[in-house]
Image: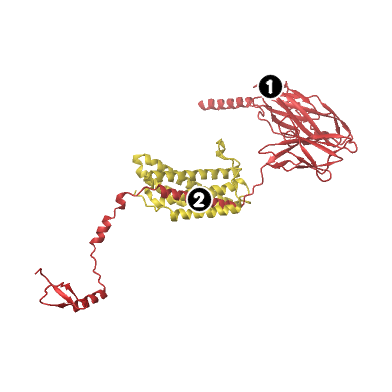
Chain colours: A yellow, B red
Amino acid sequence: MFSQTLHHLVVGLTTGIATLACLCAIAAWVSNYFVEARAARSHLDNASYIATIAALPLLPVAVLSGTMAMSDPASDAMSYNKFLFAGLTTGFLASMVIGRWRFGPGVWNDSRLSLLQVISAIGALASITVLGSIGAKMTLGESTMDILPFWPEFDDSVVVNEWLSVVLLILGLAAMVAAFRFGPKVYRIVD
Amino acid sequence: MRGRILALATITLMLIATQGTVANPGGNGDSNRDFVCGGSCHGDPSLSAPSSATISITSGNTAFTGTAYQLDTTIEIDLISHSRILGVFLLSSTDGNGDNPEDHGWNIIQDPSGTSVNYVEVIVPTNGVISLTWVLTAPELVGDGDLIVAIHHGAGYEGLAYLGVSEPHSISIDPVPANLPGFALDWSAPNYRVTGDTSPVSVLTQNTTEISVEWKLEGESISHPATVEAGMEDEWLVHLPATMGDGRIVYRVTTSNGEFDVVQPWLTMGTIPPEFDGSLMGARAQGFAGAFMIIAFMVSLQGLLQPARRKDELDQTEEVEAAEETPVEPVVEESTVDEDAAYRARLLKYDEHPGLLWDPVDEEWVDDPDYGGDE
C-alpha cells in the first residue's frame, strides 16, 4: 500500500518536473526566433537545466516504487513497456543535461546544437507522455491518448531474450563510454 | 420574478427531457430474461407495436434426453433503429414469467455470443438478415418441448418497442438409444487457442468408430472439411487452421459408429495472444540499454555538430607575448662553467700574435675573446 502511495507521489513529481524541463527547453529554442527574447531565454534555459537535473534522480525512484507497487512487474506487455519508456526518458533527459553542461548556456546560440537539445526535449516529453498513458491505462483502464487513431497498442511490446538484453546493456554502456572518450573534444560556447 | 421564470423554465425543460427519453435505446446487455409481461413497458400496448420481422427456426424436431441440441434461427428484419441493435430471446413460453428454457429442463451450453444466456443483443447487418445459434442440452424427461424465439427492437423515432415472436418449435424428446456415438462425458471442448498455433485439437468420443469434422471462420457461410487422424483409444486429432488476432473458428463434429451418424452442434474456439515471456531483469536491462544508447548517440552528435572554433579563439599571440615579457633567468650548468674556465686557462697569449691565443692541447690558434679592437 505504501509503495503505491509513494509511486503516485514520485510519479507526479517526476512527470511534472520533467514536463517543465522539456517545455522550457522547447520554449528556449523557440525564443531563438525572437530578437527581444534573450532575457527570457536565459530564464528558460536555467529552469530547464535545473528541472532536468532534478528529474533525473527521481526517475529511478519512480521506477523502483512502481516495481514495488506491482505484484508481478514486467509480467505483461504494458508494465514491460513502462520499463522501456523509462529508459528512453532517462536517455533523452540525460542527453539534455550533458549537452547543456558541456556547451554552457550558449548552447542555444548555435542552431545545430540547440536543435539537438530540443530534439532531446521532445523525445523526453513524448516518452513521458507514453509512460503516463500506460500508467493510466493500467490503473484506470483508459487514457487520454486513446483518442488518437494512430496510437500504438500498449498490449504489445518488444521483448528480447533476457541475455540478449544484457548484451544490449553492455553494448550501450560501451557505446556511451566510447562516445565520451573517443569523440571530438568539445568547447563551451560563449553566450 | 426573473428567478421564478428561470426556475419554471428549468423544470419544464427537465420534464420535456424526461418525456423524450427512450428507455434503453443502447440495449440492456446479454443476460437471462423472461419475455415481456403485460405490466412491463414493452408489454404496454401504447408503448409497443408488432415487428414486421420474419423469424424462422430451422432445427430438427427430435432430441435425445440429456444430449446436445442445436437451435438455429434466422431473422429477417427491414425496419430497425439507426443503432441496428436487436434483442433476441430464446424462450420456452411467453407468459412473462418462467419463460427461460432452463425453467423447462433445458440447459443452455452456448448462446450466439459465446456465453450461456437466453437473451442476447446483436447488431443486425445492413442486409437485414441475421442467423443465430443456441446449443442446449435436452431435458432429462422424455416428452415434448417447445422452443420459441422472440425479438424486440426500435425503429424510427416513434419511441415504440417493436415485438416479434416466432411460432413455437416443437421438439420430441426421446430416450437416448443404446450405443449412440457422441463426445466422451469427461471431454470439454477447448475455448481458446494461442494465436498461430497449428497443433491438432484432441477430441474424445464414446461409442464412435469414425468422426468427420467441418470448420469455418465465424461469420463465414461455407464450411471446409478438416483432416482427422486417430489418436489413442477413443481419441481423435483434428487439424484446424491456425487463427490470428481476434479470429474465432467454429467447427462441427459428426460422430459415427456404422449404426448412427450424429451431427454434433457447432463449437466455437477463440484466439488468445501467446503468453508474455518478458522478465523483470530483461526489462531493466533493456531499459538501461536504451538509455545508454540514446546518450551515446546524442553525445556523438553533439561532438560532430558543435561549431568550428573561430580564428580569434585559436590565436595564442597574447599568451606568447606575455610569456616573453617574463624575464628569463640564465641557467648555466656548473659543469659547463668549469670546462670553460679550464679551457681558457690552457690558452697561451703571445704579444707577436695579438687577438689570437695558442691552444697547446689541440695545437691551434683560437680567437682571443678579450681582444677588443680590430687592430
Q: What residue does disc 2 label? A: B293
Residue B370 quadrant? bottom left
Which chain is mark 2 on? B
Specify whether disc 2 shares its chain with disc 1: yes
In the shown orientation, is residue A124 left or right of residue B12? left
> In what element is the residue under mark 1?
loop
Residue B323 numbered mark, or none:
none
Depth check, front residue: B281 or B327: B327
Q: How many marks?
A: 2
Point out the image quarter for the C terminus of chain B. bottom left
Q: Position of residue A145 (x, y in %)?
A: 55, 39
> In what element is the residue under mark 2?
helix
> What residue is drawn where x is 39% and y is 52%?
A186
Q: Are marks 2 and 1 in contact (CB under 8 Å)?
A: no
- Residue B76 visible in the snapshot: yes
Q: Residues within 10 Å of mark 1 (few under 14, many from 20)?
A: some
Q: Position of residue A31 (x, y in %)?
A: 38, 41
Depth check, front residue: A22 or B282: B282
- Residue A51 visible in the snapshot: no
Q: Is residue B63 above or below residue A13?
A: above
2 or 1: tag closer to the N-terminus: 1
Q: Position of residue B98 (x, y in %)?
A: 80, 32
Q: What residue does disc 1 label? A: B79
Q: Is residue B249 above or below residue A165?
A: above
Q: Residues within 10 Å of mark 2 (few under 14, many from 20)?
A: many
Q: Is residue B306 above or below residue B32?
A: below
In the shown orientation, is residue B270 left or right of residue B17? right
How far is mark 2 from mark 1, CA to CA?
Answer: 61 Å
Q: Position of residue B301 (x, y in %)?
A: 44, 48
Residue B89 quadrant? top right
Amino acid identity at mark 2:
Met
